[in-house]
Each structure stands twice: as structure tokens, then as C-alpha cells.
Image: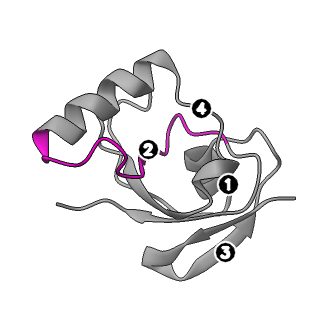
Amino acid sequence: MPRVSYSDQNKEFELKSGDVIYDGLIDQGLDLPHGCLSGSCGACRIEIISGMENLEPASFIEKNTLQGLKDEFKLAADFPLRLACRTKIKGDVKFKTFKN
């Protein structure tokens, strides 16, 4: 099973391939900043430290929200930003809460 590391809280947990990061955190008793939980508000934004290749591609909704966030925070197009409420894993990942 994929291992997910949440560096803000020094926690590591296992999820099944295809699980959404936010849901996995809740199941582990952890919480992230969040809002709509549908990929539109961007409150659950996370920075991928390692394992970007182990994530499913962003959905259309997530891509639109990520583009808006990258524009707002003046981030490079390839900055490893994702939304925890929409991001599905398929392998090991390490992330932190994105604060700007």
C-alpha cells in the first residue's frame, strides 16, 4: 500500500491506491484546512514534496482551481501544487500544507 507522509505533522500513514489524500487524513484522525471539499475553493491546497509521479492526473475542476491559485500566488506553472480533496494517490507521496 502507498505510504503518505504529511510533513507538517510529522505523520506517515498508508492508503490504498486510488484513495483521496484528504479522505485518508480524516480516516487517520488528522485534518487539513478545507472549504468546499469539491475542488473549487483551493483551501485544501498542498505542496507535493516528493512523489508527484505517484498521483493521478488532476481533474478538469482541479486544474482550473490550481491555475487560479498559481496565478494568484505568482507560482511557476510546474510548481507541485495539488488539492488534497481531489488528489488520488497511486504510490508513495510526501506533502505539506501550502502557505503563502
Q: Note whether 31 is above or below 73 in the view shown.
A: below
Stretch in magenta = 72-88
- Measured Cα–Cα span from mark 3 to mark 4: 22 Å
Q: Is residue 96 magenta?
A: no
Asked which secondary structure carries label 1, the reply is: helix
- Measured Cα–Cα span from mark 1 to mark 4: 23 Å
- Residue for point 59% across, 57% down: 25
The answer to whether residue 41 is seen in the rendering is no
Q: What amino acid does circle 1 point to? A: Asp
Residue 68 coordinates in the image, percent (x, y): 21, 30
Q: Nearer the viewer, mark 3 or mark 2?
A: 2
Asked which secondary structure carries label 3, the reply is: strand
- Residue for point 22% across, 38% down: 69
- Measured Cα–Cα span from mark 1 to mark 2: 20 Å
Asked which secondary structure carries label 4, the reply is: loop
Q: Which residue is mark 4?
A: 57
